[in-house]
Structure formats: structure tokens, C-alpha cells
């Protein structure tokens, strides 16, 4: 479980096949100095909002590796090539819940369609798949590349919806969202509570 509050920016330095004749990959990631001091093998770290397991750990060099399946690669964005990624270590029971409850399971891939300055901030506009449209609401929560954000506006479209988010300078400085541009794909995770509400409203009636 995570909160959507990014705790560091890492860098994927290598994407290599995980064995011969496989589409699975092993990613090598460099983390900020000291970031891995409390991390153990098998711990969970979210990369751009996708929960991954640490399979190789080198604290001295601030490096770790994760193994990612072809299925996960097909359902996420920007984890199949070298580049910066948002990092968040798994939530501990005594931690502050600064963002919202985030599972680290990507629900869909959105596309950036606008990234305009608004004063000192930026308005980020994203088109989401139709399957996620009903979960997006004004002032609701959404996770974009692992960052917990608040929806400022929602517009229904024939093929889905577009929503807008205001990014303050702090968010732009301490996450990778500042490097986004129209056309870029982003990982989306809907609000966990909205997921359960949808199930309760549309699920089958329990048997006696």
C-alpha cells in the first residue's frame, strides 16, 4: 500500500531480458543517495505508480533491480526504457497518509493532451480510457505516474473523458511530472474507495 507521495526520483539505467527467449525484463534503477538504507530484498517500491519487488539490492551504490513481466509492461507506461521514474517505498503502519490510499496497481494508461502554465503552476490535462471515466470526479483523487493528485475538472468525451489537474511548483520540482508534454503516456490509478463503491452499486445480489 502507498500514499501517492513521491519520496525520491530514480533513474532506470538498464532494461534487459530476464533470461533467454522471454519477454519479461529486469530493470536496474539508481536511487538518490541514502534512499535504500532501510530497504531489504523483497520490499515493495512503486515505480511511476506501479508496485514492484526489489530483487537485487546494492545499498552502497544506491542501486536496485526489479523483475517485471510482459503483462505488466503491456499495461504500464515508461517502464520499458531508460529514464527518470517517481519512487515511493511501501507505506508503514505508523506513517502519515499524506495523499490517499494507493495500491500500486495501474488501472489504465492516459495520454497528456495539455500542459499549460497557469501563474507559477501548470495545468495538466489528460485523456483517460472510457473504462476509467466513471471513477473520475471533481475534487476526487487520481494517481498519475505514482503521484496523488486532485481532479479540478472533468469533461466527458465519446471515447472516455478528459480531466485537468493543477500542479504546484513543489510537485513539479520533486516529481517527474514537470517533464511531461502533450502526447506522453502516463500511468493512472483510480481512487480505491471509488472502486469499492462501484462494486457495491453494480455487483450481484448476494445469495441467501
Image (spheres, rainbow, N blue to C red):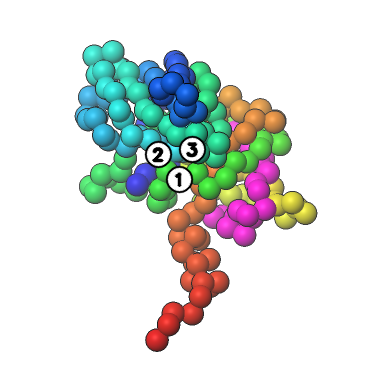
Considering only order in the chain, which callout, 1 or 2, is on the residue closer to the N terminus? Answer: 2
| Up-down relation of residue 95 to residue 14 (above or below) | below
Label 2 and label 1: CA atoms lie apart by 6 Å
Considering only order in the chain, which callout, 1 or 3, is on the residue closer to the N terminus? Answer: 3
Q: Which residues are magenta?
A: 121-140
Considering only order in the chain, which callout, 2 or 3, is on the residue closer to the N terminus? Answer: 2
What residue sits right under mark 1 in the picture?
105
Tell me where residue 163 appears, x and y as whole percent: 65, 47
Viewport quadrant of the C terminus: bottom left
Q: Is residue 156 left or right of residue 148?
A: right
Label 3 and label 2: CA atoms lie apart by 10 Å
Q: Secondary structure at mark 2?
A: strand
Residue at left offset 69%, top offset 31%? 183
Inspect this view and state whether residue 207 appears: yes
The reply to whether callout 2 and callout 1 are in contact (CB within 8 Å) is yes
Q: Is residue 58 left or right of residue 11?
A: left
Q: Which mark is residue 72?
A: 3
| Up-down relation of residue 98 to residue 65 (above or below) | below
Residue at left offset 54%, top offset 55%? 140
Q: Secondary structure at mark 1?
A: loop
Tell me where residue 190 appears, x and y as whole percent: 52, 51
What residue sits right under mark 2 in the picture?
51
Q: Is residue 190 magenta?
A: no
Label 3 and label 1: CA atoms lie apart by 10 Å
Tell me where residue 124 appears, x and y as whole percent: 64, 37
Q: Is residue 122 magenta?
A: yes
Amino acid at each position: 500500500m502507498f500514499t501517492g507521495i513521491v519520496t525520491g526520483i530514480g533513474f532506470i539505467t538498464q532494461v534487459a531480458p530476464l533470461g533467454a527467449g522471454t519477454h519479461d525484463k529486469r530493470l536496474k534503477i539508481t536511487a538518490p543517495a541514502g534512499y535504500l538504507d532501510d530497504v531489504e530484498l523483497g520490499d515493495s517500491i512503486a515505480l511511476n505508480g506501479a508496485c514492484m519487488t526489489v530483487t537485487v539490492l546494492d545499498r552502497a551504490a544506491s542501486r536496485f533491480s526489479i523483475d517485471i513481466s510482459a503483462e505488466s509492461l503491456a499495461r504500464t507506461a515508461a517502464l520499458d526504457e531508460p529514464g527518470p521514474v517517481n519512487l515511493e517505498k511501501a507505506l508503514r503502519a505508523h506513517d502519515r497518509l499524506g495523499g490517499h490510499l494507493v495500491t500500486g496497481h495501474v488501472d489504465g494508461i492516459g495520454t497528456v493532451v495539455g500542459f499549460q502554465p497557469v501563474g507559477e503552476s501548470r495545468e495538466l490535462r489528460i485523456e483517460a480510457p472510457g473504462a476509467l471515466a466513471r471513477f473520475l470526479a471533481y475534487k476526487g483523487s487520481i494517481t498519475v505516474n505514482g503521484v496523488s493528485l486532485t481532479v479540478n475538472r472533468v469533461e466527458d468525451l465519446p471515447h472516455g473523458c478528459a480531466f485537468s489537474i493543477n500542479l504546484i511548483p513543489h510537485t513539479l520540482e520533486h516529481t517527474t511530472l514537470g517533464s511531461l508534454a502533450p502526447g506522453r503516456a502516463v500511468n493512472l490509478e483510480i481512487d480505491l474507495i471509488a472502486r469499492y463503491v462501484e462494486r457495491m452499486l453494480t455487483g450481484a445480489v448476494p445469495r441467501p
